[in-house]
Amino acid sequence: MLATHQKTKRVEGPTIKEAILKFWEEWPSSTIYASVLIAHVRATVYPRRPFDGTILRKLRELRSEGRLNYKVIDNQKAIYCKIPVRREK
């Protein structure tokens, strides 16, 4: 017997990208640990539970869109350093 699929309701609240940008603006230090970012995003978008990889992919997408910038300090420990975004004149 085939299982019936229920439609998933859209959960209201901020998107993952919005949660990342809010964290990015409010975090006082220029050093950001991925584990802290992920915990903050999950708390912000609760009850949704995005995977770590999804959150980090959205972070990379925001960088490619020019909405934030960072450099990787330590890839193994997932430590990033905020860099000011260059605005085109």
Image (tube, helix red, strand yellow):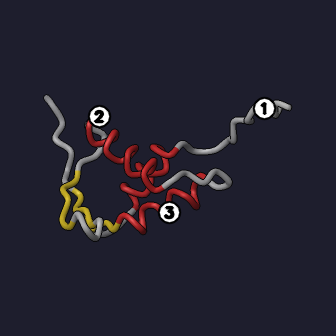
Rendered-image quadrant of the C terminus: top left
Could you tell me which residue is drawn at 73 percent across and 35 percent down?
Answer: 8
Whether residue 30 can be seen here:
no
Q: Any mark on residue 5, and which? A: 1
Circle 3 residue? 40
Q: Are marks 3 and 2 in contact (CB under 8 Å)?
A: no
Give the CA distance from mark 3 to mark 2.
22 Å
Is 51 displayed left or right of 58 in the figure?
right
In what element is the residue under mark 2? loop
* On screen, residue 81 above or below 15: below
Q: Residue at x 69, y 41 (%)?
A: 11
Amino acid at the residue labelled 3: His
- Eye-nearest disc, 1 or 2: 1
For disc 2, the marked residue is: 65
Q: Nearer the viewer, mark 3 or mark 1?
A: 1
Q: CA distance from mark 3 to mark 1?
A: 31 Å
Residue lying farthest to the front in this orientation: 1
Instruction: Pick the quarter of the image with the N terminus.
Output: top right
Check whether the beta carbons of the residues at disc 3 and disc 1 lie within 8 A of each other.
no
Placement of 75 over or under 46, stated as above or below: below
Q: Which mark is residue 25?
A: none
Q: Is residue 7 above or below residue 20?
A: above
Of 8 and 83, nearer the camera is 8
Find residue 17 and report its image quarter.
top left
Q: Amino acid at mark 1?
A: His
